[in-house]
Image: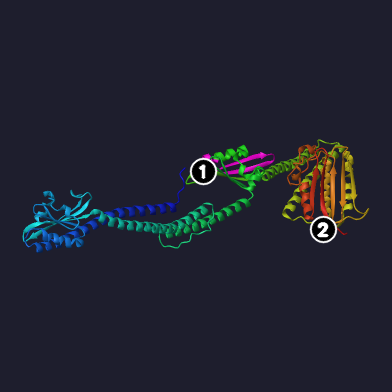
Amino acid sequence: MAAKVSIRTRLIASYIIVTVLSLGVLGVMFSSMLSDYFFTQQEKSLVSRGQAVAEIVTDVVQGRPLTLQARMVLENLSDFLQAQVWLIDRSGLVVATSSGAMEWEGLRLDAREFAEVMNGTVVTRRGRSGQFKTPMVTVAVPITMGNQVLGALFMYTPVSAVRQTVDQVQNLVFIASLFALVVSNLAGVGLSRSITGPLRAMTDLAQEMARGVFGRRVPVDTKDELGELGEAINLLAENLERSLADLQEERDKFQSIVSGIDEGVIAASKDSQLLWINSQARELLRVGHIPLDKLKLGDFPVPLVDLVRKVSTTGQVEVLDISPFPMVVLRAYGSPIRRREETVGSVILLQDVSEARRLENMRRDFLANVTHELRTPLTSIRGFVEPLLDGTVTDEKTKERYLAIVRDEAVRLSRLIDDILDLAKLESGSMSINFDLLDVRELVQRVQNVFAPQAAKQGIELRSEVISAQEGEEILVLGDSDRLQQVLTNFVDNALRHTEPGGAITISVEASETRVIVKVSDTGSGIDPEELPYVWERFYKADKSREKGKKGTGLGLAISRGIIENHGGEVFATSKPGEGATFGFVLARTGM
């Protein structure tokens, strides 16, 4: 894996490379130009001095041979010339030299070396000469008189002298270049900081935004492209912060709304991945014990999973009732989640319709029971009245028995109608309650006296007991004596209908300083614990096994609860299957 190289390092490296390349190219060009310049200046200087010496030689010679007089001139001007000087005649013979070069006198040059200068042209050359072992700068100046070339003046100076000067200048240039390189690199470091510093700050801000932190801003100190970029990133961060805040607010509103409704909500993707579920749905589906991060769609009932997949596949709204648990009915409304006309998932709304379904069943049963209860006495009355009317029955005892049956059925019908009317009054709030102080002992005794003959006839023991702090004290409550007697009558009648011969029914009173508890307990078949919460419902009748052929209207306990609640009390029921049941109520005690 390649090592990470920062932008700052690359910028500094680019500055160094550009500077080195620039200085290198400039150094090479400058060195070449400097060398040419110095050599050119040297040549121009030699030409100028050579021409001056040539004029002097011409004036001295005055047409005589170039011998002694010329040698004297060269010796006197050798310091001025700063070069080795040869004087040649037209034949190329060295006739005179400057001081220190007399060994070259008498040398005859090759015609190629002096032919051009003998044509009256000044000649300059660089490089090796046949007479010297080192490279030389050579300048040849013709000596003329009128239009006639008398000879030539050859001047030689070593290239090394010029090269030494060039090298010294190049050394100075190299030192200056190094200094410029250091200065430029320092400037590059500072410039790179001015670029990479804001870039680093922008990078940090971008990383913080990626982590969901939007409170930080990049300082903008310039008006260049970096400044514009910084302002753009700051604006982006501000817009993202505002947008996410709006999204979070909307999400909180959505979660608050969804969490506040009674229905369960489930969202799933098209590939059956659980996206969201509220607490109500977890409670309805009884998956609250599974951690949310481990909860999967497969943990739900199969019909619900099938509904999710069907809605996601078809894109159609679906409604389904499922019963995932005993006595629980959930209505599931499935709707597709669409994005750009494409179904990407589904959302399921769960409603617990168990109570509505139960009430519906109870109403159906109630109507069936009421219809049956009304039809039965009416049919019975009709069946016994018709023989009396058509004279079929003539025996007086039989007539009396038929009339007694008609009377009993009429009473039964009247009681059913009274119960329905009482229930209607309770629901409308129009039942009158006449509050007065009454002794619960007397209330219990009256009810016991009423049912004692019936209990004895059925072979059931009916007894009462009072538990109080003081023997014989009054146990007073504020209430309607007739309505409370109606409640207690319903309890005892209910117990008689569900207790086998040889069983017992106990009416008990428990009095404390603040409240009075009245209970009716039997030794009958008892009630299933799952049905206990519903026995007080207005249309509910317990398990048919308790009825023993003696059906009630299913309204007595509902009416009793309404009466006790109108007295500010509460009712209760306990039971164990096979061990009997207890129904009772609690009222506040007064008169202490």
Magenta span: helix, strand or loop, mainly?
strand
- Kindly indicate whether the residue at mark 2 contacts the one at mark 1 (C-beta within 8 angstroms): no
Which of label 1 and label 2 is nearer to you?
1
Colour scheme shown: rainbow
Looking at the picture, how far across and down is residue 199, in whole percent?
A: 45, 56
Amino acid carrying label 1: it is Val
Circle on res. 170: none
Is residue 352 in view?
no
In the structure shown, which secondary structural element does the residue marked by tag 2 occupy?
Answer: loop
Within the magenta stretch, is there residue 314? yes
Whichever of callouts 1 and 2 sits on the residue coming sooner in the sequence is 1
Q: How crowded is mark 2: few (under 14 residues within 10 Å), some or many (20 or more)?
A: few
Q: Position of residue 288 (x, y in %)?
A: 66, 44
Badge 1 marks a residue whose secondary structure is: strand
- Please check the rendered image and state whether residue 456 is part of the magenta-colored stretch, yes or no: no
Q: Residue tagged by mark 2?
A: 435
Left of 248 or right of it: where is 478?
right
Q: Residue at x 19, y 60 (%)?
A: 78
**Residue 207 at x, y percent in the picture:** 51, 52
Q: Name the residue under label 1.
A: 344
The picture places residue 43, in percent across and down from the top left corner, at 20, 57
Q: In front here: 240 or 484?
A: 240
> Given the image, on which type of amino acid does mark 2 rest?
Phe
In 3D space, how far apart are the residues under numbered discs 1 and 2 (Cα atoms)?
65 Å
Number of residues whose C-alpha sits closer than 10 Å to that of mark 1, classed few (under 14), some (14–19) or many (20 or more): some
User: Residue at 75% of width from left, 53% of height from top?
Assistant: 426
Magenta residues, start to end: 311-337
Please state if 588 lies on the left or on the right of 199 as rendered: right
Which of the image's four quarters has the C terminus? bottom right
